[in-house]
Image (spheres, rainbow, N blue to C red):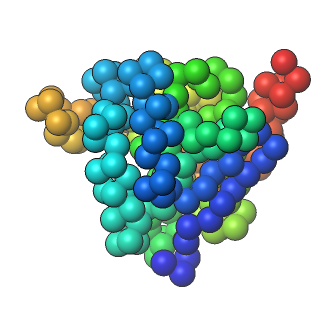
Amino acid sequence: MSWLSPITLSDEIVKLVPLELSHEKDLVEAAKDGELWNLWYTMVPKPEEMRSEIERRLSLQGSGSMIAFSVIEKASGKVVGMTTFMNIDAANKRLEIGHTWNRKSVHGSGLNRRCKLLLLKHAFEELECIAVEFCTHFLNRQSRTAIEGLGAKLDGILRNHRLLPDGSLRDTCVFSIIQSEWPTVKNHLTYQVSRFQRS
């Protein structure tokens, strides 16, 4: 894990901290805000499954394939969601940002955009990634629109890519931002974040 280790990233509004079991209570409360687990095309844990999900992510972190973060809204001091660096490929300097969800009350606030800016800045400027990927369900239009809004481009669609817990098959849309695109994407995201700050 010498290339990528747990780290805290922050700006004036949001802080991404290493995920801990002590965050379970806030994360259960966050998931209940909007009953996010009822969105069948996402993988938000039910309240009673939150601890096992935290343990799963920490286990993957221990094996070197994931770095798990809790999302803290600085104004409230509470954990409002989760995100990860995942599918870490140190040899090729690639990773995916995914398994992201936030409580419904912060949707549309610009908080998630801030998180993505922090994660992408670390990936491209500190880790010197050559590409960062984002994946989502073909039918998750909200997620696809949000990923495109970051400046990521669609690489393709992996059909019947994953078997979901309900037995359905997921067609996965794969997006990426490559190293040469980062300066433009950074300007774009910085501008968007500043607009949320003024409003």
In the rendered image, residue 73, in percent from the top left (x then y), is placed at 67, 38
In the rendered image, residue 3, in percent from the top left (x then y), is placed at 55, 76
Q: Pick the residue in front: 194 or 172.
A: 194
Outermost right residue: 198
In the rendered image, residue 95, in percent from the top left (x then y), is placed at 48, 59
Query: Image point 38% across, 52% down: which residue?
Result: 54
Q: Pick the residue in front: 133 or 113.
A: 113
Query: Image point 63% across, 20% down: which residue?
Result: 108
Quadrant in which the C terminus appears: top right
Q: Pick the residue in front: 196 or 139.
A: 196
Residue 155 lies left or right of residue 128; in this view the side is left
- Residue 160: tell me if it is visible: no
Outermost left residue: 167
In the rendered image, residue 32, in percent from the top left (x then y), is placed at 42, 25
Q: Quadrant of residue 158?
A: top left
Query: Image point 28% across, 37% down: which residue?
Result: 48
Outermost bottom residue: 2
- Residue 73: tell me if it is visible: yes
Q: Pick the residue in front: 22 or 98.
A: 22
Q: Is residue 173 above or below residue 124?
A: above
Residue 45 lies left or right of residue 115; in this view the side is left
Query: Image point 69% across, 56% down: which residue?
Result: 9
Residue 66 lies left or right of residue 137; in this view the side is right
Q: Quadrant of residue 155?
A: top left
